[in-house]
Amino acid sequence: MLVDINPKLPMRDKKVTREFYSKRLGFKEFGSTDFDGYLMMEKDQVQIHFFEFKELDPKENYGQVYIRTDNIDEFYKFLLERRTDIHPNGKLEIKPWGQKEFSILDPDSNLLTFGQTI
């Protein structure tokens, strides 16, 4: 029955969010219509949607997404080459639950954790 999921995260500035996800993470904008206050970004089979929340305080934002990958080492290297900051508490490591993971924060402090089963 269920076939897909597209998380919706808050953003303060559509242009800043678009630029971060495209230049730092390699996403592309999804769709041909530019919706006011809404953005859809896609990379491979993953889509993340964003809704405008201009009053968002990044220090109080708890938006989070866990994204599975099939080549975490290559993606991690790709991000480092693009000078994407890795979360200081989210370095690439093998977790006790059998995942190799790392995390980053976007400009609005949405936490993106990338993981691969080992």
Image (cartoon, rainbow, N blue to C red):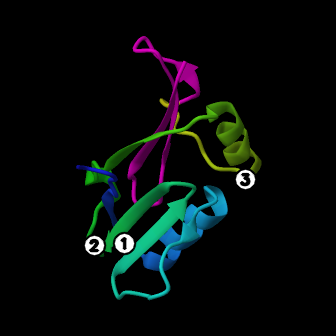
Kindly identify which residue carries mark 2: 53
Q: Secondary structure at mark 2?
A: loop
Q: Quadrant of residue 7?
A: bottom left
Q: Secondary structure at mark 1?
A: loop
Q: Is residue 26 magenta?
A: no
Q: Are marks 1 and 2 in contact (CB under 8 Å)?
A: yes
Circle nearer the N terminus (1, 2)? 1
Residue 8 rendering spot, x and y as whole percentages: 30, 61
State which quarter of the image contains the C terminus.
top right
Kindly identify which residue carries mark 3: 82
Residues rendered magenta in the picture: 91-118
Name the amino acid, label 3. Answer: Arg
Compute the Cα span from label 1 to label 2: 5 Å
Give the farthest residue toward the front. 1
Name the amino acid, label 1. Answer: Arg
Q: Please give the name of the residue rendered at 50% of the width and 73% of the height, measured from the top-left corner.
A: 30
Q: Are marks 2 and 3 in contact (CB under 8 Å)?
A: no
Q: Please give the name of the residue rendered at 43% of the width and 11% of the height, measured from the top-left corner.
A: 96
Q: Secondary structure at mark 3?
A: loop
